[in-house]
Structures are given as C-alpha cells and as structure tokens.
Image (cartoon, coloured by chain):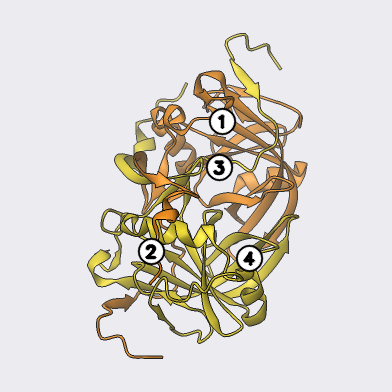
Chain colours: A yellow, B orange
Amino acid sequence: MPERPEMDKIAIGPLPYMSVMPTVLVGANVKGKANYMTAAWATVACMAPPMVCVAINHARHTLKGIEENKTFTLNIPSAGKVVETDHCGLVSGEKEDKSKVFRTFYGKLKSAPMAEECPVNIECRLFKSVDCGSHVLCIGEIVEIHLDKACTADGKPDVAKIDPLVYSQAEYWHIGKSAGKAFSKGKEYVKK
Amino acid sequence: MPERPEMDKIAIGPLPYMSVMPTVLVGANVKGKANYMTAAWATVACMAPPMVCVAINHARHTLKGIEENKTFTLNIPSAGKVVETDHCGLVSGEKEDKSKVFRTFYGKLKSAPMAEECPVNIECRLFKSVDCGSHVLCIGEIVEIHLDKACTADGKPDVAKIDPLVYSQAEYWHIGKSAGKAFSKGKEYVKK
C-alpha cells in the first residue's frame, strides 16, 4: 500500500452509522391491538421476490406483535405528519395506546395494521428474523403496497408528492434538489 | 373493520420499494483487486454490536469478493462524485477494472478496500449472508469507520458537510431542509 500523505481521515470507531435513511412507521398488531413504531433502520432486501428489512430492538413492544402474527407493515409518513411520527418513537405501546394516532386499515394480511394517513403502506409477511445482538433484523416479503392516488406519477409512488422524511443524525429532513439520474449520470465518466 | 369511504388508495402490487435510501459504494477485493459497486439497498442492522446490511444481486462480481474474504466496506460518496458513483453501477468489475475509479486504502481489515475520495468509509466483517431470492442480504459487523476531518462536527459525521446522495426512484438527490429534530418534535403531539 503506497503512503497517502494527502489523506486526512480520522478513525471514529465502530458506530451504528448510515448517511441517510428512510423514516418509517412499523405497524404490528400486539395482542390484537394496532401499534406503530418509528424506525429508520430499514431498506429493500430483495428484488424477486420483493422484500424489505427493518432492524428492531429486542425490547420493543412492536417486535412481540411481529413474532405473534409473522406479519408487519412499513408505513411511509409525509413530512406533514412529523409530530405524530416522532411521537410514535417517543412512547412505547406497552405504556400508551398508540392505536388512535393514525386511522388503521387492513389489507391482504388481516393481522398487519396500516396507517391511512401515510401515503405509502407496505404489507409484509415475515420471511426471516435475524438476531444481530441488540436488534433483530426483520426481513419481510412484500405482499402488497397501498398508495395514495394523490401521490402517484404514472401509477408509481412519486417522491415529490409523498414528501417523505429523510432521517440522518437524529433529525428529519425533506428531500432536496436532484443530483442526477441514476444509470445515466455515470455515462459522463472519463476513464483515468 | 369500519368502512373508510374517505380513503383514496390504490394497490400497486408487491414491488421492491422504499421511499428514500442511502447511496453507497460497496467495496470488496475480488481475486486480490479492489472493486466498487453502487448500491442503495443498505441500512443499519444493529446497534450493539454496530452492524450494517446491504442487498446484493447473486450475479454481482462484488459478491464473489465478499464471499472470498468475508469482509466488505460501505463508502459514502459526496454529491460531487455522482458521475464516478453512478459509473460504478453501470459497469461490472468482471468486464472493466474499477480499481482506479477511486484511490484505494486499507484499514484494520486488510482485504476490504476503501475509496479515499468518499468522506465516510465503513469497514465490515461479514456477520451473516441471508439468501432472499434474487439478492443476498449481506450483514456486516462494523470494525471501524474512517471519516474525513473536513466532514466532522464534534468528532462525528456531519451530513451537511458530507452532502450524501439520497437515492429515490432511480434518481440521486441532495438532502433538503430540516423537518425537525427526532426524539423532540413528537413532544408537540396532542392526544386524540
């Protein structure tokens, strides 16, 4: 390895860090009652079949419901619901009934509650739970996606209309300006 | 379940959808040569020990390197490197040598290449590979995080200075305005 005198980096140790993440509300029925938990440690896990994953602390009330029913939902709140969204991350369903924070509806899976006020609702059947330590990574196969008609463009979810909350360093952010199209911008690359 | 005549949603089927995701470059040595692959299907998987996960298609050249060495890196490019970043998603390391797109350095793990021009570099030891179908979810325990000194605030990564690429619907975006502090905004909630 050649020396890199120009490099000016510091080692900050192992931390549970990611640059930006989606803000989601994990929906689950716990003992028959709808519950919503705010989370950001979520992403797509597979294309075919379509899957998502979300990391949930072992102590969470929501996890009990996922284990009970083997189903859960990921609900994408708009920035206009930041107060309700953050509230669901501040209080536990074990101590406070969160079933009335949003209007709940059910879809194909009868045991996975969805928040009507969220423009996107992703219904999942639990595919696998991976115990990573403090958190369980819940991987769910997507059964259906429900989308507000007002938030579509060509029948697909439109990020500008959804106005989702980007999560980074304990703060919620709006999405900003475009930085270029994927699978396109790279064509400008000139080989070194 | 009560009827919800006010609800105006459409079912769009199961799709590999998430609102917003981070843009990362997955680094791996394949047959001794550094390779970088663009990905967005990544997030934090665990707090203690700190872990991240990233979904990678079975056919990817990068996956061979991860399986070979049981190590990988996630590198966070700044928006200024969008051309190089997207380029690494357009061409396969099997057909084109991508080892010179970025200057490579190594850290604690001697087999996990990191891109110097990326302000954040996350070194991981493979914890578990979960075969989900078309994609393998690679879960890695974070061994070290390297951070550009110029991108710190109180010794931690600063999102405004990093200017990461938010990924949504095949487009890269800058982060926008704040929508409120997490674990704080929810205190304004008035119970229904």
Indicate the position of residue B110 as horizontal and vertical percent values.
76, 29
Q: Which amino acid does label 4 sit on?
A: Cys
Secondary element under disc 2, as helix, strand or loop, is: loop
Indicate the position of residue B176 as horizontal and vertical percent values.
33, 40
Q: Which amino acid does label 2 sit on?
A: Val
Tell me the residue that label 4 is attached to.
A138
Tell me the residue that label 1 is attached to.
B120
Tell me the residue that label 2 is attached to.
B190
Residue under mark 1: which chain is it in? B
Q: Residue at x 49, y 62 (%)?
A: A88
Q: Do the residues labelled 3 and 4 touch (CB within 8 Å)?
A: no
Q: Distance between the residues labelled 4 and 2?
A: 31 Å
In this picture, residue B2 sits left or right of residue A125: left
Any mark on residue A18, and which? Answer: 3
Secondary element under disc 1, as helix, strand or loop, is: strand
Residue under mark 4: which chain is it in? A
Q: Toward which corner of the image does residue A129 lie, by quadrant? A: bottom right
Residue under mark 3: which chain is it in? A
Q: What residue type is labelled 3?
A: Met
Instruction: Determine whether B89 is above or below B12 in the image.
Output: above
Tell me the crowding category of disc 1: few under 14, some 14 to 19, or many 20 or more residues within 10 angstroms, Cα based. Answer: many
